Image (cartoon, grey):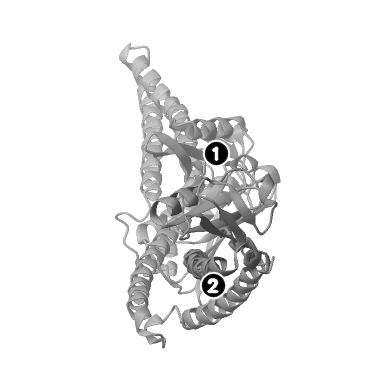
Amino acid sequence: MTKRIFRAIFYVTLVILIAAMVIILAFIRDFNKNNYREQMRNEAIYIADGLSYGGISYLESLPKDSNRITWIDQDGVVLYDSQADASTMENHKEREEVQEALASGRGESSRYSKTLAEKTENFALRLEDGTVLRISATTLTTLSIFLSMTQPMALVLVLALVLALFLASKTSKYITKPLEEVDLEHPEQALVYDELSPFLRRIAAQNRQIQKQMRQMQHRQREFRTITENMQEGILVLDTKGEVLSYNTGAIRLLGIDHISEKETIYALNRSEGFRTCVEAALHGSHRETTLEQGGRSCQLLANPVMEEEFVAGAVLVLFDNTEKAEREKLRREFTANVSHELKTPLTSISGFAEIIKNGMVRQEDIPRFAENIYQEAQRLISMVQDIIQLSRLDEGESGMEKIPVDLAAVAQSAVSRLRPLAEQKEIDLQIDVEPAQIMGVPHVLEEILYNLCDNAILYNKEQGSVCLRIRDEGAQASVTVSDTGIGIPQEEQERVFERFYRVSRSRSKEVEGTGLGLSIVKHGAMLHDASVSLKSEPGEGTEIHLVFPKKA
């Protein structure tokens, strides 16, 4: 702003000086012209009087450094000239001033010399004897006057500019100082001259508007950040060059990286061919989807272009974690295959025995034995279907399963009483060592857990072996331990015993009755109650399964 003030004052001063010079030059020109002519008239009248008395001798007595004096007769012949030899001069009858003097008694003319940049003023006066007396004076032209005034005018210009700069500095400081001291946060409180008050009120109104808009933007930004940061899905926003403009923590987690640097290119985050193809398609204006497999996780990538009018302004990438879905799909396929396989055996047996009886190929005394086989296979099939139904319910989570205070000791007594006949039949010593321990849980699910643990311990035990069920109240939690003296589980198979339809000893699958779903029901029931499950086992020495239930679910 100060520079603009300086420039404005400089230009104004320069224009004023130039205008003043033009006016002064015009005034001097007119003044000189009128003054010279008046002097020449007076001088001509004075010399004419002297000439009438003294003749040519009077003219010769005049100073040679005065104005040029020329005496011309009626025919234009030069009788005398104060600066040249009259005999050598040309006839002056055609001169303008001479003609006017002969005609009217007086004559005037001006002649300009381009070479000398001078102008000659002539005044002619007709005398009583008819001769003409001419006075000539050399005057300066406007250009010569201007050139003669250059130095003083330059000095005046410099002084004027210095004064103008000084005044401009003072004026600019006077104008800008109040502006520099204005608090832009509170401009209405500033002490300024009245002319600035409307401007400051406008700034204050704009500040209030901007602050309001900033609060709204910050509120929306916080809302957006809260939403995106709490999303399980990953979001990345890219510009047209593929540089990351924005992202959330979900994107970092799903891409398996530590952080994303400022303006980092998206291609540095994942170098797989499918990822690159998907991103490039979005940056060229096409929607594309793909599945990424990395770090044991499965992610679905959706890439969409961001359009501004008809041009691509960037892209938005959305990542979905499909790991659980993929695992469930895998489990579903495995479960379907296992169910088909497990159901096929009893159904084949039932169908075979029934077909033999139907065709009359069985002796009358063998029918009860075949009927017993059909009954056993049917019971096995019913047990398997019940276990599958129980697993399906547990897979659905807490839907329809209300948790209430449950005493684990009472549940254990009920489960053990159901298994007593089986233990006695297998000659297994079934022991119970419990103390009251109340937790929040689903009674029938807890009983199924304890029943299946003890049932497995009995089925996979040695002859005349033992099974012990212990329950302890440990303050904030309750523990359940089922130990046996059975065949044990090899170390390499201990992680798989909780899988559906998995049984340790395949060679004994026909000898040991069971569906292979018992420990899977235990695992899912424990998950429903937020309980932890651990297993210790040595082949030939037995197995111990330990569960810890929190008292507050």
In screen coordinates, is 105 left or right of 148?
left
* Above or below for 502 versus 434: above
Q: Which residue is mark 1?
A: 502
Nearer the observer, 17 or 524: 17
Residue flagged by tag 1: what amino acid is it?
Tyr
Nearer the observer, 215 or 24: 24
Instruction: Give residue 43's position: percent from left, percent from top.
Output: 53, 69
Q: Which residue is mark 2?
A: 2
Q: CA distance from mark 2 to mark 1?
A: 89 Å
Crowd rating for badge 1 (residues with CA inside 10 Å; few <14, some 14–19, many 20+): some
Nearer the observer, 101 or 257: 101
Is any part of residue 503 visible from this angle?
A: yes
Instruction: Give residue 440's position: percent from left, percent from top.
Output: 39, 68
* Above or below for 176 versus 313: below
Badge 1 marks a residue whose secondary structure is loop
Residue flagged by tag 2: what amino acid is it?
Thr
Instruction: Give residue 422's position: percent from left, percent from top.
Output: 47, 49
In screen coordinates, is 275 left or right of 401?
right
